[in-house]
Amino acid sequence: MARWVEVELGPGDVDAGLVDELSGRLWSLGVVGIEERPLDGGGVRLVVGPAHDDPAAVLAELTTLREGDRWGGLRVRALASDEEPWLDEWRAHAEVVRVGRFVVQPAWLAAAPTRPGDVVVVLDPGRAFGHGAHPTTRQALAALERLVSAGTSALDVGCGSGVLSLAAAALGARVVAVDVAGDAVAATRANAERNGVAAFVEVSDTPVGAVRGRFDVVVANIGAATLVELAGALTARTAPGGVVVLAGVLAQRRDEVLAAYDRALGTSDGVVDATAVAAADGASHDGRWRVLAEDVLDGWWCVSLRAPADREHVDAGPG
């Protein structure tokens, strides 16, 4: 059975807007991850992880796109687990990634120079998604640097390679990391051991709706469609006064995602107050969630929503 779908765009087909639009279409199908990898000569390869290792919906969408004039140059194939060696080709192009104090260091590269106060995360994604370079990962890391300190409880939903879990643990958080993909669970565990934080990162394939407890910080870098689907579960796992960080969203889908969170929170009149940004160190006492921060990077939108300090428990059910 196929485990991945490979999509290649040649040099003449590549521009940032086109690649981001294609990624957005694929995220809307509920895929579990997309890696963008450069090709020699200037092209781009997208490696797509279909939900439940079932590529049917992804292949159908790509077939439809290829029938149009705009996307006719896409080269597509489904890959089974015995066709994995090519997946390591991207490692030759990997670089150290710096986001604020975080330094994401590929495990196979020579150690990069650091500065006092840097937080180094040594990462080998294996067959999981996420090596720290994508704009959405950078946005989530920047949010974690602002929000996490010693003693913070954090939930990483769709943990992939574990880069966000490791970053939070390195700042002193106790982390629960979940992902539906077995490769991601294995990679996060291995990377937690590699960075000496395994005692602070609990990793499993538990559905987020079945995770017990509520957390000071919930982070989910998983694409608009999945964020919408899990809106109830993600907000239910956020502690009073806590923050949920949503990433992996193309900027044009901002309003759609915020509307979904309004619906999940039980009102259509703006429980998520997008007009008033909360104080960085305070939560509301009027029952309203606040947009704590939002930004756009290379066409991708990320938002941090702070829960009210006096919120009641919400049972979101399975998710």
Image (tube, rainbow, N blue to C red):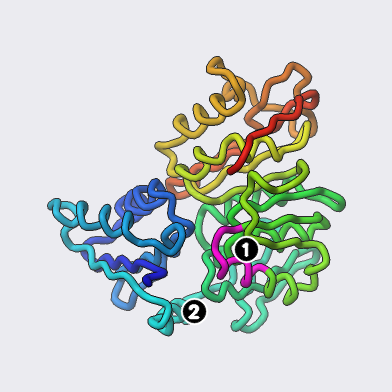
**Amino acid identity at mark 1:** Arg
Q: Which residue is mark 1?
A: 98
- Give above or below for 150 relative to 128: above
Point out the stretch of residues depicted in magenta. 179-188
Give SS at disc 2: helix
Task: Compare residues 197 and 56 and report the one nearer the observer.
Answer: 56
- Give above or below for 294 relative to 179: above
For image coordinates 56% across by 58% down, the residue present is 180
Question: Does the segment drawn in magenta span residue 317?
Answer: no
The span from disc 2 to disc 1 (Cα, nearest Å) is 17 Å
Q: Is residue 304 visible?
A: no
Give SS at disc 1: strand
Kindly report the secondary structure that dominates the magenta region of the rendered protein.
Answer: helix
Asked if the residue under mark 1 is in contact with the one under mark 2, i.e. CB atoms within 8 Å, the reply is no
Using the image, tell me which numbered label, if any, was put on residue 91.
2
Which of discs 2 and 1 lies nearer the camera? The answer is 2
Q: In the picture, which quadrant includes the N terminus?
A: bottom left
- Please tell me how many numbered marks the rendered image carries: 2
- Give above or below for 283 relative to 1: above
For image coordinates 74% across by 45% down, the residue present is 147
Would you say 76 lies left or right of 38 here? left
Q: Return the disc, 2 or 1, that comes first in the chain's sequence.
A: 2
